[in-house]
Amino acid sequence: MTARSELLERHSYNPIEALYWLLLIGTFFAFPNYLSIATTVVIMALFALSLDLVLGFAGIVTLGHAAYFGIGAYTAALLASGGWREPIIDAVLAGLASAGLALMIGPALLLLDGLPLIMVTMAVSAILFEAANKASWLTGGDDGLRDFSFLPVFGLFPWSVYGQTSYLYALGWLALLFVLVRRVVSSPFGVALQGIRENRARMRLIGSPVIGHLVRAYTLSAFMAGIAGAVHAQTNKFVSLEVLGIDTSVDVVVMLVLGGIGRLYGALIGAPIYILVKHFAAEWNPYHWMFIIGALLIVAVRFGYGGLLGILGRIEAWFARARGTRKP
Amino acid sequence: MTAALETFDLCKTFGALKVVDRVSLRLPQGARHALIGPNGAGKTTLVQLLSGVLRADSGRILLAGADITTSSQQRRVKQGLVRTFQVTNLFRGLSVLENVFLAVSERQGASRQMFAAAGRRRDLIERAEAIIEQLGLAGDRHRRISEIAYGQQRLVEIAVALSLDPKVLLLDEPAAGIPSRETSLLLDAVERLPPDIAILMIEHDMHVVRRFAREVSVLVGGRILMTGLPHEVMSSQEVHSVYLGQAGQKRFTAGVPHV
Ligand SMILES: Nc1ncnc2c1ncn2[C@@H]1O[C@H](COP(=O)(O)OP(=O)(O)O)[C@@H](O)[C@H]1O
Ligand SMILES: [Mg+2]
């Protein structure tokens, strides 16, 4: 039993959170040779955060979120190829393109739940993948898009060879959208999402516009995923069909489950763990890195309901109890 | 004067089974109406029709004179038609306060606010806490539904309904599963409701019916057998006979020792 309502205290920051952000900033100075992979981590953390909003907070189970990441990536690349080379507005437009699709299909899609929803989200992203493959005049097909570049960020910071600008640019988006999502899940709307996740039928009978709420969360999530995709395109200066692939959708779910669903920092912690384990385990043994991820997943799900953050929370509670019992 | 809630010839069949059969009911403003009837009579199904969870096959439902027969569940709630469940139906993973907050927030139109902190909406929290207090649940407001006794869950069910500012309140066996000493707490709460709310209570316990109701209808096999004042209904031979052989018999006669 907690003394206060966690749900109604979500807006208050915990000082320990600063540590996470200091680590990300510290990475910039401590590992200048690893900024490329660090940028990937930050982008995937943002993508996982967008997934957490729907999967973790609204209970929308999707295996097709790559659709929005991919649309964002292609939109950003195509806009730049077409001459719009200012990165920030480009990313926002890419996010809006993804949000547009979500807003269009959301009202019908979100009538579904459970397995049918999973199947349809997968199907939507598979259709997009095939469409992008067929439309090679636009997307470059298998070869992808690569002949585009962007103006300096804020007109001041050119895209450096070693990726300093890329990293800080991605980190800036992550921080900005994190604050946004934090606000949204702490709001009365966020509380309503929690209610929908708990008991959708009951929400209708307190008068809640359930589908409207879900569509709003889904659209915001797609917007964020689209920005993550755009930042991916901008920092890699390359987009291939992979961004729309089922692997991308599954990866991001695994990251979120590893880190902990429905807690914001789960997404932010799951992404680095997944990517770093994949990177270093693949160097060690290119065929067996999946086993390590698999083992981690089992540990996270079996022992830490709520992912690694759940395990940490349990350890903390255990220490708190141990301290409490030792007091006279 | 227009009735708070009125139905005309409401019908619902499941397959070949007529579960609700031409039910016409009229609840004036401020009604305290009890609906009794044996198990399987169709009482819960009637509530499902009224709340819009199920659609009637035929017939009409008017809420304050407006036809709501085909309105969505949400719309009915917004217009003041609120129900509770025979089997507790709450947000089990959330605390008592959070359950009630959800309803208050929805009622006050706050649930579309995406950027203000819910925890800083003192107005909503205080309203939720006042309702919780009223039902004697203040000590448990931070406990999860899954952690509190079933009797208390029944009270939360009422608290959620009250948070929605009902004009018409449908209570489906609110005392089912509550220890009898706690029943009076629940009835106290019901009695403190604003007198202009129309209440339809489905109830088996005749003590409760006698204390609560000013009017009683008897539903048998989906049909209204009779409607009348409590003492008329309880002394009716016909009503007695439909409870014969039912588990309800004992409870029924227990409630009317003078018959
Ligand atoms: N969804 C359903 N499908 C088929 N039959 C149902 C359904 N719901 C209720 N029934 C049947 O309708 C009858 C009335 O049920 P109900 O309204 O729950 O009665 P009561 O609340 O008066 O005990 C029962 O015979 C029950 O088995
Ligand atoms: Mg019933």
Image (cartoon, coloured by chain):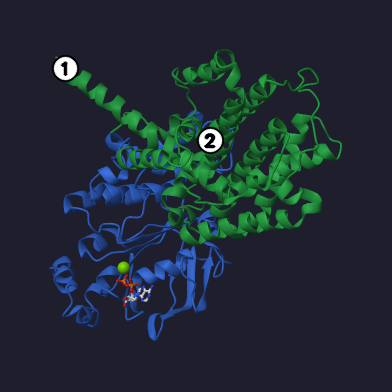
Q: CA distance from mark 1 to mark 2?
A: 39 Å
Identify which amino acid the numbered label 2 is placed on: Ser
Q: Is residue A65 visible?
A: yes
Vertical side of A275 occupied by B148: above or below: below
Q: Is residue A327 above or below residue B47?
A: above
Comparing B245 with A322, the one in front is A322
Colour chosen for chain B: blue
Q: Give whichever of A68, B184 is nearer the camera.
A: A68
Question: Badges 1 and 2: C-beta atoms under 8 Å apart?
Answer: no
Q: Residue at x 81, y 52 (%)?
A: A137
Q: Name the spot of residue B66 as percent of width and height, x first.
A: 58, 65
Using the image as rendered, state which of residue B176 and residue A156 is in the foreground.
A156
Tell me the residue at 79%/29% (across/down): A150
Mark 2: few/some/many CA within 10 Å (<14, 14-19, 20+): many
Of the numbered discs 1 and 2, the one sitting upstream in the chain is: 2
Q: Secondary structure at mark 1?
A: helix
Chain A takes which shade in the image? green
B149 or A320: nearer the viewer: A320
Q: Which residue is mark 1?
A: A326
The image quadrant of residue A87 is: top right
Task: Name the residue at 13% across, 71% down.
Answer: B250
User: Of the numbered discs in the image, which one, if any, rests on residue A187?
Assistant: 2
**x, y percent for residue A256:** 47, 39
- Seen from this angle, which residue lies furthest right? A83
Using residue A13 as the reference point, say whether residue B37 is left or right of it. Answer: left
- Chain bearing mark 1: A
Circle 2: element type:
loop
Left or right relative to A72: residue A111: left
